[in-house]
Image (cartoon, rainbow, N blue to C red):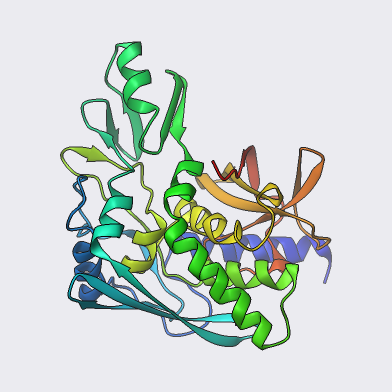
Amino acid sequence: MEEIHVYIIILIITVLALNSNFSFGKKISTNVSEQNLLVIEHLTQFSSRKKNYRKTPENYSSNGYLINGEIVDDAAYLEYKFPLIDSSESLFKIKLYAQNTSSVVSQYGIGTDIVESADGKIRIIANDLSTLHRNMNKDGFYFNSIDDFGINYNHVIKISQELGNPIAMFIKTELEKKGKDSYENRIRAALNFVQFIPYGVPEFDHDQDIYWGLALPHESLAISYSDCDSKSVLFATILVHLIRPENIIMVGCVMKDMGAHMIAGVAGFNYPGEYVSHNGKDFLLIETTTPHPLEAQPVGIYENIEVIPVKLI
């Protein structure tokens, strides 16, 4: 089959996966479970940020790999069986405490007195520059000017280390058990961990706070779904403990005919695919939303690429 035909097939599959309930692999689930909703509400009960986890996520779909949670006293146990590498599955378990998770969630969000959300877009409503600099350059956001503001993804990675490190250490240990611990397999396993989480666009906005459509890593696991930027952040949060941070980037872009999107990039590969150069390195662009193996990443569907270096600040 000619190379261009392969790229077209990959593009079609990607579009279907991101805009419908089409999915790869196992049995498709189309609903967020009540148990997952109870778990995330339990874990965030002490947060100073108000969030609405009950809104149905857009384009929800799963590949049969769900994160299960059980509430126990002031904590919750999460279990997630996912394909580590070579189709072999591993079972990740973690105990999260409500106080700790609430503290993390409290460190991200912005007030509705500063910005408003309409039709999926954020608009600044405050008009005093000193107020904007003071209130937007914190809690996971940055503000340089009226035309230059957004999410500080490195802040989100930093506050999520309680979760990223144990996931990374689990992946490393599992690979060592199989005698397959390598640079490439660490990335492959971390990508599988993220890609097989159900897809759904989180809309947690509340009357007092706006969250820019981002689920924090703790939320992605507890509620058992996540979208493109949320998964890219989770991927980076795990990967900084497995490879050098300077070999990781997050990439804001536009997907042709589909709008704003976020993917990741990793240096040190020689696979076919689309690459972007940054600081003297070539980064393979990696789709985090739905299962795409490293060897078959989409090509030619990303435009307006913006590199966001990953830094442990």
Residue in the picture at 73% in, 86% down: 179
Residue in the picture at 38% in, 67% down: 221
Name the quarter where the C terminus is drawn: top right
- The answer to whether residue 152 is seen in the rendering is yes
From the viewer's side, name the closer residue of 310 and 257: 310
Choose top left, top right, bottom left or bottom right for residue 75: bottom left
Residue 172 in percent (x, y) is at 62, 74
From the viewer's side, name the closer residue of 298 and 206: 206
In the image, taking residue 56 as reference, residue 221 lies left or right, namely: right
Residue 96 in percent (x, y) is at 32, 68
- The answer to whether residue 86 is seen in the rendering is no
Considering only vertical position in the picture, is 240 above or below 303?
below
Considering only vertical position in the picture, is 141 above or below 162?
above
Residue in the picture at 15% in, 40% down: 207
Residue 71 in percent (x, y) is at 21, 76
From the viewer's side, name the closer residue of 183 and 4: 183
From the viewer's side, name the closer residue of 57 and 135: 135
Tag count in the figure? 0
In the image, taking residue 133 as reference, residue 251 lies left or right, namely: right
Choose top left, top right, bottom left or bottom right for residue 101: bottom left
Residue in the picture at 35% in, 37% down: 139
Residue 222 in percent (x, y) is at 32, 67
Name the quarter where the N terminus is drawn: bottom right
